[in-house]
Image (tube, grey):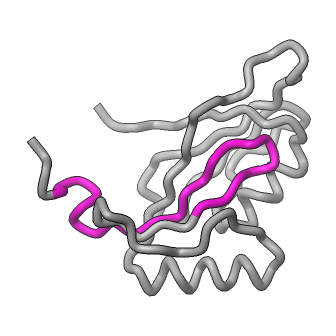
Amino acid sequence: MTLNQITIPCIDYAESVAFYRALGLVQIVDAPPRYARFESESGDGATLSLHAVDPATELVAAGTVIYFDHDSAEALDRHVRELEQRGVRFDTAPADQRWGWREARLTDPAGNAVCLMFAGGNRRFPPWRI
């Protein structure tokens, strides 16, 4: 089994599309005002989709976190600096975590949590893996 896509809710279609494009995702589907799909520059095949919802009548994500891995801690830090220079606001700056990842966190326009991270080998093979 291979991960195909993750679809998350958005409230303001245009604002959410602009947010994920600003993060560096490549938009591959544009079906306003309800649906957009993106893939990473790595071209690994996994995609992220946005589906517009009406928060008064439809479920908005709670507890969802979207993780975007980077090739190195330096690449993560550089990406965060570039995004900050373009006006993207972060909830937390890049920091090394006790579980072996380096993470910076922000929130998308619909309130979904986003984590830009570098885990290296700890992403799939942490010391506590069973």
| Residue 121 location, quadrant | bottom left
- Left-right relation of 94 to 49: left
Please check the rendered image and state whether residue 5 is part of the magenta-colored stretch, yes or no. no
Q: Residue at x 47, y 82 (%)?
A: 75
Location of residue 69 (image quadrant): bottom left
Residue ID at (50%, 53%): 67
Q: Is residue 124 above or below residue 12?
A: below
Most extreme residue toward the front, as rendered?
Answer: 98
* x, y percent for residue 28: 68, 50
Kindly give the residue lying farthest to the top in the view shown.
57
Residue 88 appears left or right of 97: right
Answer above or below: position of 64 versus 116. above
Q: State the image coordinates of residue 82 (x, y, percent, origin top left).
A: 68, 84
- Establish if 105 lies above or below 56: below
Quadrant containing the C terminus is: top left
Q: Write the residue at 13% across / 47% down.
A: 129
Q: Is residue 60 left or right of residue 41?
A: right
**Place of residue 64 in the rendered image (x, y in percent of width and height, measured from the top left):** 57, 36
Chain part drawn in magenta: 105-126
Q: How many marks?
A: 0
Query: Residue 107 location, x and y as percent?
Result: 71, 53
Q: Nearer the viewer, residue 93 or 79?
A: 93
Residue at 65%, 68% (x, y): give it. Answer: 24
Residue 58, quarter of the rendered image: top right
Split into 4 quadrants, where in the image is the N terminus?
top left
